[in-house]
Image (cartoon, rainbow, N blue to C red):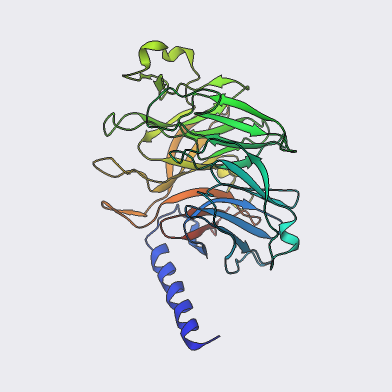
Amino acid sequence: MRSWAWLLLLLMCQACADDAAQLRVPDGFRISAFARVPGARGMALGGQTLFVGSRGDAVYAVPLGRDGKAGEAVQIANGLTLPIGVAFRNGDLYASSVDRILRWPGIEAKPGKPPQPQVFYAGLPAERHHGGRYLGFGPDGWLYFGVGAPCNICAPEPDTYANLQRISPDGRKREVVARGIRNTVGFDWQPGSKALWFTDNGRDWLGDDLPSDELNRSTQPGQHFGYPYCHQGDLADPEFGAQHACSEFVPPAAKLGAHVASLGMRFYTGTQFPAAYRGQIFIAEHGSWNRSSKVGYRVVRARLDAQGRVAEVVPFIEGWLQGQAAWGRPVDIIVAPDGALLVSDDEGGVIWRVGYEGRR
């Protein structure tokens, strides 16, 4: 490697170390830069690869070594539209591109020359407003994704917008799973019960402190979670609220705060963290964009009690927001093979790694 390339690499490593020093995690944990990925958004684990979507037009692959360390990120696709969501199943990679979902068959067998993508499913709404599709395969083998409302507040066609949907493994059948969801960019299934939990972003322009983002729990298909008639389970919308009472809808499992932009969420399924963290929910707060005083820009933990209810929501990683200036914005969360927590940051273009080094 040329001397200038070594110097650039050294400077980048030093910059990441300096940034990590600004981040605060609980005692016993350590946070460090894992990989650099431009505009990093959704993440999915393959057999030996971390696949990462982006807020640009590209999808990336980060090789994972046997030592748990990451190799250099490689762009494996570009020219896509908001490919924020990625998913991996049976050797194939899936990525969203607003109105369609693409598939790269057998991608890990050809790491140096990715196959040409196939269209797995087309004909989704083409609006870019809330048009990014977070992806995830459920325990049933179907591919789940959110379709946000094409607006801040409106009453769109309920089988098309403001819902969670799923596509059968063969790509032939599409169903609505849940309605009344303004925009979800994160969901996961609870270990054991297989219940589907998801975040939802509250509407704008009702002031600094209303309405709250939501953490929701779906207990059966077809449930309605309130949008656009009711927000945070108990706040009637000033324009649409007279049409339906809040009591008609499923209330949130937890209120996460107004304008924090709750995105990716995961249950912690590893064993590296202490027992108190296992089975708990981690949520990435991307941060406010139109609040007079900024909030969010952190990762929180929703602590579940013995009955599976949210007992409290507490900070887990803070420091991306310094005063009113933010230098990072967490997006998605995934549990690494070694039990560490990986957090994507689209502002810094970094995948952060949180490991536990204290006493168990």
Q: Nearer the viewer, residue 75 or 333?
A: 75
Q: Nearer the viewer, residue 223 or 277?
A: 223
For the image, the number of numbered tags is 0
Does the image show residue 154? yes
Residue 260: x and y, percent?
A: 37, 40
Q: Residue at x 48, y 77 (%)?
A: 9
Q: Quadrant of residue 259?
A: top left
Which residue ends up furthest to the left in the rendered image? 292
Q: Is residue 345 above or below residue 226?
A: below
Residue 359: x and y, percent?
A: 56, 56
Q: Quadrant of residue 234?
A: top left
Q: Residue at x 44, y 54 (%)?
A: 25
Q: Is residue 272 above or below residue 211?
A: below
Q: Quadrant of residue 52?
A: bottom right
Residue 69: x and y, percent?
A: 61, 66
Q: Is residue 123 left or right of residue 168?
A: left
Residue 227: x and y, percent?
A: 44, 23
**What quarter of the picture does the N terminus occupy?**
bottom right
Q: Nearer the viewer, residue 330 or 123?
A: 123
Does the image show residue 269? no
Q: Residue at x 39, y 51 (%)?
A: 318
